[in-house]
């Protein structure tokens, strides 16, 4: 880092964790230590000529909050630097990012292929929204490469996937699916919310666009909603994604962008700690007499744990617990928890447990639930930042009483 450039530190020589602390910083003339929150919707000009010049050189300076904001730009640039993206745009929620990344590149007559195991709102965009605009969604078993091969044997415009999936923790082979997608002419959008950029780097396996629900581990403290779209190729983003976002306005608020920007500084430390704790909790639960089965990417019992080890550097903070019994055992266990909170949110510093069958995935049909393995005895656990032993003891007591 150059001493002379303290207002705009050059982080190119730094290691990834340092980039999360300093990347994208633009200091004002007040030389503040902490990144400034520019809570403004517009910008002023010293003269009419200056305004004319700003509009003639599109993007060269800030002109309006829907297009750019200095605080938001710091968040975008910092994560782009870390993730290896040429372009990024922060959105008001993770779903706004999914919608923008997909719909910007699709039109009537196009075909989009995705796994059935998707976050419920992502599934809605594909299954319900796409057909309204003449876009055909095709669903596959994301873990079955021959289904991907068949679905991608005809020209396709887009592939959308999430790995590990929520809450089934299914792993999609990123390299193989990206190769098949590109041969079919499709761009690939990866929802990287569960793994986070710390544990999985989809661009290295061929993804074209990455989206995150920054609401989850990027904030990490349950304080605000946000999302981000990252593109590997600036040209594609400039031609396809940016005009769509700029004109439809799913923009993040500067305050939320500031929270997420500060969240990035501790992202690696938190994700490594939560992922290590989740692995310990998973091992404990797998040996528990009241538990039928635990799904966690790094457990050798996970059907795709070899693949998980090839494309992830850690298992993440999420686990799926299938209890012996059904809904009442699941409810009794949730109701017996003292420290772990009952919540449908995830990725918080507080450990959170949910019953997907009756909450997040309640609207699925019985067939869709069966395909996504949303069973009455399933609990989803988001491991937080508490002492791992306290998490284990809380679960152990709740299971014993259930
Ligand atoms: C939460 C989540 C989303 C949606 O993000 P919001 O910030 O709630 O809009 C999308 N994908 C996955 C995998 C998620 O967990």
Image (tube, grey):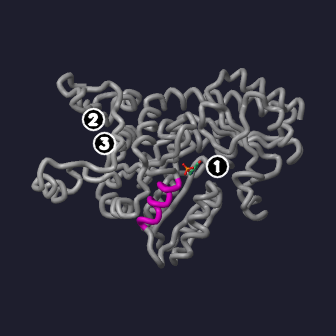
Q: Residues within 10 Å of mark 1 (few under 14, many from 20)?
A: many
Marked residue nearer the N-terminal end (3 or 1)? 3
Helix, strand or loop at label 2? It is loop
Return the residue nearer the eye: 387 or 236: 387
Whole-number angstrom distance, CA of label 3 to CA of label 1: 33 Å
In the rendered structure, which segment of residues is drawn in magenta?
95-105
Location of mark 3 (residue): 70
Instruction: Classify residue 342 as left or right of residue 152.
Output: right
Tell whether label 1 touches label 2 (CB within 8 Å).
no
Viewer can see residue 295: no
Give the percent coordinates (x, y) of residue 56: 16, 59
Q: Quadrant of residue 76?
A: top left
Q: Which mark is residue 166?
A: 1
Return the residue nearer the eye: 154 or 8: 8
Marked residue nearer the N-terminal end (2 or 3)? 2
Tell whether label 3 touches label 2 (CB within 8 Å).
yes
Instruction: Classify residue 115 as left or right of residue 181.
Output: right
Marked residue nearer the N-terminal end (2 or 1)? 2
């Amino acid at each position: 880092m150059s001493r002379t450039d303290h207002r705009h530190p050059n982080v190119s020589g730094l290691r990834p964790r340092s980039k999360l602390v300093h990347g994208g910083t633009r200091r004002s003339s007040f030389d503040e230590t902490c990144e400034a929150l520019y809570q403004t919707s517009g910008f002023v000009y010293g003269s009419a000529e200056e305004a004319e010049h700003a509009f003639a050189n599109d993007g060269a300076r800030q002109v309006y909050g829907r297009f750019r904001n200095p605080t938001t730009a710091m968040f975008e640039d910092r994560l782009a630097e870390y993730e290896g993206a040429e372009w990024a745009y922060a959105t008001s929620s993770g779903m706004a990012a999914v919608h923008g990344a997909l719909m910007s590149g699709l039109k009537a007559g196009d075909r989009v292929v995705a796994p059935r195991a998707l976050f419920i709102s992502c599934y809605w965009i594909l299954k319900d929204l796409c057909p309204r605009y003449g876009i055909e969604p095709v669903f596959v078993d994301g873990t079955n490469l021959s289904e991907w091969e068949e679905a991608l044997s005809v020209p396709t415009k887009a592939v959308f996937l999430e790995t590990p999936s929520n809450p089934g923790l299914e792993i999609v082979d990123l390299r193989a699916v990206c190769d098949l997608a590109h041969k079919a002419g499709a761009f690939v959008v990866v929802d990287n919310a569960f793994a986070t950029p710390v544990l999985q780097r989809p661009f290295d396996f061929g993804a074209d666009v990455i989206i995150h629900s920054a609401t989850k581990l990027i904030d990490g403290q349950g304080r605000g909603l946000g999302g981000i779209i990252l593109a590997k190729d600036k040209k594609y983003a400039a031609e396809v994604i940016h005009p769509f976002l700029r004109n439809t306005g799913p923009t993040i608020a500067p305050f939320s962008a500031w929270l997420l920007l500060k969240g990035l500084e501790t992202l690696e430390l938190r994700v490594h700690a939560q992922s290590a704790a989740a692995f310990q909790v998973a091992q404990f639960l797998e040996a528990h007499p009241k538990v039928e089965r635990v799904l966690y990417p790094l457990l050798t019992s996970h059907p795709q744990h070899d693949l998980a080890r090839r494309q992830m550097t850690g298992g993440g903070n999420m686990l799926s617990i299938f209890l012996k019994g059904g809904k009442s055992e699941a409810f009794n266990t949730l109701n017996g928890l003292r420290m772990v909170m009952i919540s449908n949110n995830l990725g918080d510093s507080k450990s959170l447990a949910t019953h997907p069958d009756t909450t997040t995935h309640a609207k699925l049909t019985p067939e869709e639930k069966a395909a996504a393995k949303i069973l009455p005895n399933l609990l989803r656990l988001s491991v937080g930042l508490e002492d791992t032993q306290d998490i284990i003891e809380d679960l152990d007591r709740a299971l014993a009483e259930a």
